[in-house]
Amino acid sequence: MKSSWISSALAPLALFAVLVLGWHTAVKIYGINPIILPSPLQVAKSLWEEREILATGFRTTGLAAVVGLAASVVLGGVIAIAFSLSSVLRGAVYPYLIFLQTVPIVAIAPLLILWSGYNFRTVVLVTIIISIFPIVSNTTSGLLSINPNLRDLFRLNGANSFQTLMKLRIPAAISHLVLGMRISCGLAVIGAIIGEFFVGNSGQYDGLGTIMTRWQGRNYTSGLIAAILVSTLLGIVFFVAVNQINQRCLRRWTSASNLDSDR
């Protein structure tokens, strides 16, 4: 088990080393201006020198992404349950969710700032808008695609709609919810950073998106790349966290759903 984990980690690490070496070689051979592309050593230096600022940005953006993702899971779950109970409601509202997903967030963000202000709440709202659709779509699919034999069994035993929902539909949809969370966890980080691009214009916010905007204006390319790496790390942390939640808290339902689908 341990050797398998090590071997699976070696390939990505080896590829990363090759990419960094190629990056360093290209900068040295072609004499690329550091404003255009700094060397990996310059990025590492900026990463160390700006560690406190980046750590603060990591926490700020991470908190916004956590709150936005949690709100998306709760709100998206409620909407999915409503969709599963009413085909009329699903047909009426679902197109508007698709519309919200297709409208560029950069077009909506200025309106959100006008209505909500340059604050943490606006960043969370942007995060919710970006990350809620996969939750609603996948959870609705799980709630509607239950085993017909189990549904008939519940009906034969006199279960009402609420009992069927709580004891059959929701447990069967957990695996779909986890899939939606895996997609939305990355979107939540992206949404938080995009929100910070706009909110950061007030000069009163210290998230990673704000840091990137500030350093871009200063042509601080090595710091900008360091901030991008920290943002990537945040996305990885979110993905691992969702998998851990699945393994530790939801495994009972996801395993049961997988077994049921195999049959």
Image: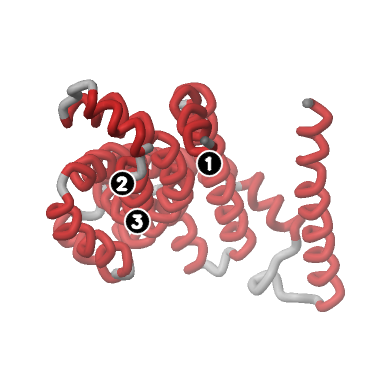
Q: Is residue 25 above or below residue 164?
A: below
**Between 182 and 148, which is closer to the camera in this rendering?**
148
- Report the amino acid beneath label 3: Ile
Who comes first in sequence, dot 1 or dot 2? 2
Q: Residue at x 80, y 48 (%)?
A: 11
**Between 7 and 94, which is closer to the camera in this rendering?**
94
Q: Position of residue 71 (x, y in %)?
A: 29, 40
Q: Is residue 261 left or right of residue 51?
A: left
Q: Is residue 236 left or right of residue 138?
A: right
Q: Position of residue 76 (x, y in %)?
A: 28, 44
Mark seen at residue 140: 2
Q: Nearer the viewer, mark 1 or mark 2?
A: 2
Residue receiving disc 3: 130
Circles 3, 1 touching at the beta carbon (< 8 Å):
no
Q: Secondary structure at mark 2?
A: helix
Q: Is residue 87 above or below residue 220?
A: above
Q: Nearer the viewer, mark 3 or mark 2?
A: 2
Mark seen at residue 211: none
Q: Secondary structure at mark 1?
A: helix
Mark seen at residue 239: 1
- Report the amino acid beneath label 2: Thr
Q: Residue at x 58, y 45 (%)?
A: 233
Q: CA distance from mark 3 to mark 2?
A: 18 Å
Q: CA distance from mark 1 to mark 2?
A: 22 Å
Who comes first in sequence, dot 3 or dot 1? 3
Q: Secondary structure at mark 3?
A: helix
Q: Residue at x 42, y 46 (%)?
A: 180
Q: CA distance from mark 3 to mark 1?
A: 16 Å
Q: Is residue 29 above or below residue 161?
A: below
